[in-house]
Image (cartoon, grey):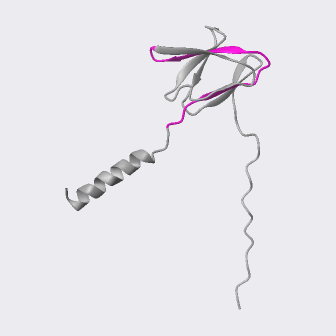
């Protein structure tokens, strides 16, 4: 095997070893009661009972539709990177409400003499 072909094979294997994992949606039950979450993705489905303060990670990496407590009228569409919570019987997107840190102000410096 030539030197260049060997280097290419090593680089290809390394890229697979260090590839970032795919992101998937996560759901946290922040409600005071348990809820059943039904996940529909293509022809497949899954269901899980979430107790208060329980989280379900890696729910649907390619996106899915979810129903809360078998409510066939109200569905929620999730993307693979969504982070949501159940509160008061509804699903809400989580977001960071903390203000982002301001960039430091640049003050002009007098020219060096």
Residue appearing at x 75%, y 21% in the figure: 52
Q: Is residue 77 left or right of residue 55?
A: left
Closer to us: 52 or 76: 52
Up/down of 58 relative to 45, above or below: below
Q: Position of residue 70 (x, y in %)?
A: 63, 8
Q: Is residue 62 left or right of residue 49?
A: left
Q: Quadrant of residue 86?
A: top right
Give the magenta range.
Answer: 22-43
Q: Position of residue 102 (x, y in %)?
A: 74, 56
Q: Position of residue 77 (x, y in %)?
A: 57, 22
Most distant residue in the right direction: 32
Up/down of 101 relative to 64, above or below: below
Q: Quadrant of residue 109?
A: bottom right
Up/down of 5 relative to 38, above or below: below
Q: Quadrant of residue 3?
A: bottom left
Q: Position of residue 90 (x, y in %)?
A: 72, 18
Considering the image in quadrants, where does the C terminus appear? bottom right
Closer to us: 39 or 108: 39
Residue 38 on the magenta span: yes
């Amino acid at each position: 095997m030539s030197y260049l072909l060997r280097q290419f094979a090593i680089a290809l294997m390394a890229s697979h070893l260090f590839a970032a994992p795919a992101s998937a949606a996560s759901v946290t039950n922040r409600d005071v009661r348990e809820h059943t979450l039904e996940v529909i993705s293509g022809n497949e489905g899954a269901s899980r009972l979430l107790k208060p303060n329980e989280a379900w990670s890696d729910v649907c990496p390619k996106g899915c539709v979810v129903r809360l407590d078998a409510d066939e009228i109200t569905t929620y569409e999730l993307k693979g990177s969504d982070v949501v919570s159940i509160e008061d019987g509804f699903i809400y997107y989580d977001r960071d409400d903390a203000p982002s840190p301001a960039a430091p102000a640049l003050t002009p410096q007098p020219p060096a003499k």
